[in-house]
Image: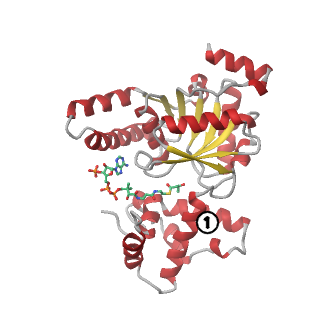
Amino acid sequence: MAFLSHQVCRGFCSSAVRNVVIKQVMIVGGGQMGAGIAQVAAATGHSVTLVDMSDDILKKAVKGIEGSLKRVAKKKFADKPEAGEDFLQKTLQNVSTSTDPGSAVQGSDLVVEAIVENLKVKQDLFGQLDKAAPAHTIFASNTSSLPISDIASATNRLDRFGGLHFFNPVPMMRLVEVIGTSATSQETFDSLLNFSKSLGKTPVSCKDTAGFIVNRLLVPYTMEAIRLHERGHGSKEDIDIAMKLGAGYPMGPFELADYVGLDTLKFIMDGWSTLEPNNPLFAQSELLNKLVSEGKLGKKTGEGFYKSN
Ligand code: 3HC
């Protein structure tokens, strides 16, 4: 009934739309971020459909979710292994998978996209989903650096489009950046804030500006650490130790870059340096470019600034 009323309302009286209570969530992209978002949504009682291009990718993603859930359960139910097992099974029951986004979106209140950082690919996906999705469905992108409004422009639901930016590892990081464009309706924005809270996360409100809040600070900081090393002012080991022990960061900038992925870091930097070529914060790093060209992308490939254990 609620679903029907949203549909009717969007079609005939868009200004009167109420907040969408999000129960069914479709996550597109079974990589680290997508799987992490699927995990926390399922663990907090949402019904989740994880979508990717092949069953192999999806199997790997679900295996990753299971592994991460076991770590969470071990900590959360340290003295109650049976409750931990129950939590694991119930969460996994909330996750289904699909390679067909058009049909998976049918019952979804919210779509969260966490696919490759390529504007055209994201626009193509959302353009297709827009035609198939119910009228009330909210679309959100987990992009690290692309403008939400550019992605949303491929759809006819600008008022029901926003950003939900999660942090790696999603099950551990407590923040979600909620991004509204100039066209995002207040109802949509509130629904996204409430959804973030329902995941047990703390949301912050962001404008649709490059890097939102966290990456706009974290990426230039990480790049300056790499340039500092390139200038010969410190070894990467010493810089990491310095930031951990001197500034209380859980990881040093080189460890974090390897963890996030050097390709992701470079992609963000390339986009921003194209937009603002004279901004010294966005200056290229030869070392980063070299490692990426050699396929040394960090933890995911076994080597980046460091070799992974
Ligand atoms: N799933 C479930 N539990 C996890 C986990 C995961 N993926 N990762 C860590 N844990 C939990 C487990 O309970 C683990 O214990 P276990 O090893 O016995 O299972 C416990 O945390 C401790 O983990 P570790 O021993 O591996 O190490 P730490 O204590 O250092 O914690 C960390 C790991 C939470 C990742 C911490 O180092 C940290 O907070 N690092 C900074 C991460 C960060 O800054 N992320 C943001 C990146 S920017 C981003 O994502 C934006 C994007 O757009 C680029």
Q: Position of residue 53 (x, y in %)?
A: 53, 38
Q: Is residue 19 above or below residue 212?
A: above
The residue positioned farthest toward the top in the image shown? 1
Name the residue rendered at 31%, 31% in the picture.
Answer: 87
Q: Is residue 52 visible?
A: no
Q: Nearer the viewer, residue 135 or 116?
A: 135
Name the residue rendered at 37%, 30% in the picture.
Answer: 91
Q: Is residue 53 above or below residue 104?
A: below
Q: Quadrant of the C terminus?
A: bottom left
Q: Nearer the viewer, residue 213 or 63?
A: 213
Q: How is the image coloured?
A: secondary structure
Callout 1: 10 Å neighbours few (<14), some, many (20+)? many
Q: Position of residue 240 (x, y in %)?
A: 40, 73
Q: Position of residue 221 (x, y in %)?
A: 54, 70
Q: Is residue 105 above or below residue 185?
A: above
Q: Position of residue 190 (x, y in %)?
A: 63, 36
Q: Nearer the viewer, residue 97 or 206?
A: 206
Q: Is residue 285 visible?
A: yes
Name the residue rendered at 47%, 86% in the picture.
Answer: 233
Q: Which residue is mark 1?
A: 269
Residue 303 as seen in the image, left or right of residue 128: left
Q: Amino acid at mark 1?
A: Met
Q: Is residue 12 above or below residue 304?
A: above
Secondary structure found at label 1: helix
| Ligand 1 quarter of the rendering | bottom left
Name the residue rendered at 43%, 32% in the picture.
Answer: 44
